[in-house]
């Protein structure tokens, strides 16, 4: 098993700083970022040092990840809009972004591996995550169908009780998208 990349050995707060610095620099200026990162490592009392070439390799991969994440976010927003989720999309958007970002991180990590490095458990985890996302979409549709039937039953009852006319009921069903 190969040794981990030095960037992968960074403490979480420095890794977050590095990712932010890369985004702010437009994924360039690796020399300055490497100098500042190594200064921060020294200041933290860590003996780890990261060369510009290792940082650039990580930066290229991270830039691709950010690009894919933005594309996934755009796809998710478009899909939710197409599905008519509306306000529900706003409430669940953050959760969906987190799940898609995690899925892309797992996919990215697996794509960088070869042969014996590939962990079947990680692939299983990714498949399970995607299945759960698709299943939640099916559950949402079932809930929407149940709500539609409930509202339609209320319209029928209101018509039978003389609270609304049949024409009003038909128009309400059209407006609500039942017809």
Image (spheres, grey):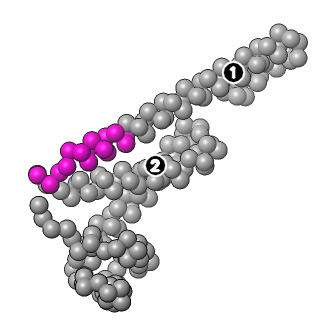
**Residue annotated with mark 1:** 150
Question: At x 25% / y 82%, what residue is drawn?
Answer: 48
Residue placed furthest toward the front: 45
In the picture, residue 112 is in which quadrant? Answer: bottom left
Mark yes or no: residue 64 visible. Answer: yes
Graded by Cα atoms within 10 Å as few (under 14), some (14 to 19) or many (20 or more), the crowding at tag 1 reads few
Question: At x 61% / y 23%, what residue is drawn?
Answer: 146
Question: At x 47% / y 53%, what residue is drawn?
Answer: 97
| Image coords of residue 2 (percent x, y) | 12, 64
| Image coords of residue 129 (percent x, y) | 37, 42
Q: Earlier in the sequence, mark 2 or mark 1?
A: 2
Proximity of marks 2 and 1: CB atoms separated by less than 8 Å: no
User: Does 85 sit left or right of 168 as displayed?
Assistant: left
In the picture, residue 134 is in which quadrant? Answer: top left
Residue 129's place in the image compared with 5, above or below, is above
Judged by its main secondary structure, the magenta piece is helix
**Residue annotated with mark 2:** 75
In the picture, residue 159 is in which quadrant? Answer: top right
Q: Callout 1: helix, strand or loop?
A: helix
In which quadrant is the N terminus drawn? bottom left
User: Does 57 sit left or right of 43 as displayed?
Assistant: left
Residue 174 sits inside the magenta stretch = no
Q: Which residues are magenta?
A: 116-130
| Image coords of residue 91 (percent x, y) | 60, 48
Q: Callout 2: helix, strand or loop?
A: helix
Number of marks in the rendered image: 2
Viewer-side residue, 72 vs 96 = 96
Residue 148's place in the image compared with 44, above or below, is above
Residues under labels 2 and 1: Cα distance? 31 Å
User: Does 146 sit left or right of 136 as displayed?
Assistant: right
């Amino acid at each position: 098993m190969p040794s981990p990349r030095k960037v992968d050995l960074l403490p979480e707060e420095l890794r977050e700083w590095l990712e932010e610095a890369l985004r702010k620099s437009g994924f360039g200026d690796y020399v300055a970022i490497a100098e500042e990162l190594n200064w921060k490592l020294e200041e933290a009392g860590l003996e780890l040092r990261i060369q510009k070439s290792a940082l650039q390799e990580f930066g290229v991969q991270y830039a691709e990840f950010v690009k894919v994440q933005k594309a996934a976010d755009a796809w998710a927003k478009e899909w939710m809009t197409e599905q008519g989720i509306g306000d529900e999309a706003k409430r669940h958007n953050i959760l969906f972004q987190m799940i898609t970002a995690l899925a892309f991180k797992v996919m990215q990590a697996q794509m960088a591996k070869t042969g014996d490095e590939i962990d079947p458990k990680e692939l299983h985890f990714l498949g399970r995550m995607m299945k759960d996302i698709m299943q939640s979409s099916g559950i949402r549709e079932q809930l929407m169908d149940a709500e539609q039937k409930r509202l339609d039953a209320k319209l029928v009852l209101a018509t039978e009780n003389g609270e609304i006319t049949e024409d009003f009921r038909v128009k309400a069903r059209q407006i609500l998208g039942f017809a």
